[in-house]
Every structure is written in C-alpha cells, then in structure tokens.
Image: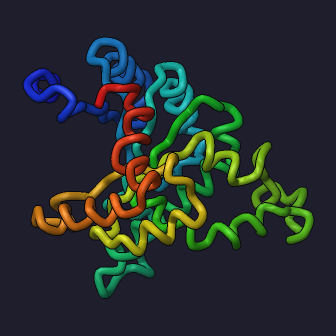
Amino acid sequence: ECKALEKRYPKRIIGFAHVNPLGGAEALKELARCADELGYPGVTITSEQDGLYLDAPQFEPFWAECEKRGLFVFVHPALKLNESKQFDAYDLARSSGREYSLQMATIRLINAQVFDRHPKLIVQMSHLAGGIAAILGRLRSYQDKVFWGTKGNPKHGIAPAHDLDHYIDNNLIFDTGGFCGEIKSIKTALVEIKAGRMVFGTDYPQEIRTSDVIATFIKELKKLGADGEAILSGTAKRLLKGRV
C-alpha cells in the first residue's frame, strides 16, 4: 500500500521500512527487502525498546545491516519509556521524558562507538535529539575522561574515537519536529548544530494541527536565509539521495 502511494504521489510520499531492530534474522531479511526491492531510503525505530537502549550489543546486527544497505535510521522517541517512574505526573512522559530519551540515545550511540564501527551509518534524531544543543557544552566537557576521573572505568570511561562534533557533523541528522513550530527552538539549536545537519519536520498532526501554524513556521524558517533553505530542502535532498 505504501509503495502504491509512492507511485501515485511521486516526490511527495516516500516509504520507510519498519522492522523490529531486535527481531533477528527475519527482521534483517525484511530490512533487506525494503531496501533492495522497495527502494526505501530509511528505516524507523524508537529511542529505547524492550528494556534496552540503542547502545546494547543486541542492536549490533541491525546497525551493520543498515550501513550495508545504505539505509539511514530515523529514531523517534519511544512511546513507552523503559524507566518511567519520574515521569508519572503532569504529562511529563510526553512533554520531557521522550526528549530525555532522545538525548540519551544520541549520547549512547556515540560513546558506545557505534559510529566508529559503522562510519557510513547515518542516524536522524527526531525533535532535534530532544533539544540536545542546549547541553552540548556540558556533554563535551564530560567526554574528557581524564579530567573527570573516569578513565579506565569499565562503564563510564568508554569513549569514542573522535570528539562529539565529529559525529554531529558526519553521522547525525536532526529534525525540527517536536517543538510545535516554535522558531526560537530552531534558532537555539543553530548555535550548536549546522543547518546542513538539520531537516524540516513538524510532527503533524500530533502537535501542529492547523495549516496556519505550519505556514507561519515555514515563513519564520525562510527568514533565516540560507540556513532556513538548508533546513527546508537542502538537507532532505542529500538525505533522501535526490528523491525529493
């Protein structure tokens, strides 16, 4: 059905693979079919699953297959968090818990050396990776394992081959969904993340439910000039390999 919609609305609808990254051989077979037979450019997963996080070794066959097939991985926040007790009131699981999950997924992928093992792997983090730009200064500092006394620790002393910005500039893409069309959030992210690593997203109809809000959001992005154009179209063209 999705492939039929692609043909009916070329360059407007593009299908993605949806497989269980922990599903073993059958899931990898389906991933290969989606890439080779259906021509889908990416696959969607969640930021945590079944009590595991994306740095767990059980995910390794999935990452390897995605790199092999040239599929980028779109990471959406998990709708059910592995640990949810602290988010049990005030709708916190949706308002902040999901964003925290995306931040953790990003940090774990980098520090677990997933991108070092799979340097061609591209991961698109939704919601600007939970607004990770705002804490990148702190995160960079804590990558210095000697300074913080964690060097040699079997859990906390693990570090990737390069600094955080290497992976932000080479392996990660960040979409603008998740912030309800608030241009200030995009401007905040641009302080730390290049526009060429950001792609337009709205999370419609979950958070933006009327066309006028989307229209205003697009107008505000266009006011950013070259950065806005990169977010609205340039990054997507590279990510989708010219299919839009």
Q: How is the image coloured?
A: rainbow
Question: Is residue 27 depicted above or below 75 in this figure?
Answer: above
Residue 50 appears in the rendering = no
Furthest-top residue in view?
37
- Quadrant of the image containing the N terminus: top left
Residue 36 appears in the rendering = yes
On the image, the x and y values in percent for residue 203 come to 25, 58
On the image, the x and y values in percent for residue 81 come to 40, 64
On the image, the x and y values in percent for residue 56 come to 58, 46
Question: Is residue 121 depicted above or below 128 in this figure?
Answer: above
| Residue at the image point whose x is 11% and y is 29% from the top | 9
Q: Is residue 223 left or right of residue 160?
A: left
Q: Is residue 202 left or right of residue 234?
A: left
Q: Nearer the viewer, residue 241 or 21?
A: 241
| Residue at the image point whose x is 29% and y is 31% from the top | 244
Q: Nearer the viewer, residue 112 or 190?
A: 190
- All told, the count of numbered labels is 0
On the image, the x and y values in percent for residue 154 come to 81, 55
| Residue at the image point whose x is 40% and y is 43% from the top | 74
Q: Quadrant of residue 171?
A: top right
| Residue at the image point whose x is 8% and y is 25% from the top | 8
Q: Quadrant of residue 238?
A: top left
Furthest-bottom residue in view?
90
Q: Nearer the viewer, residue 128 or 224?
A: 224
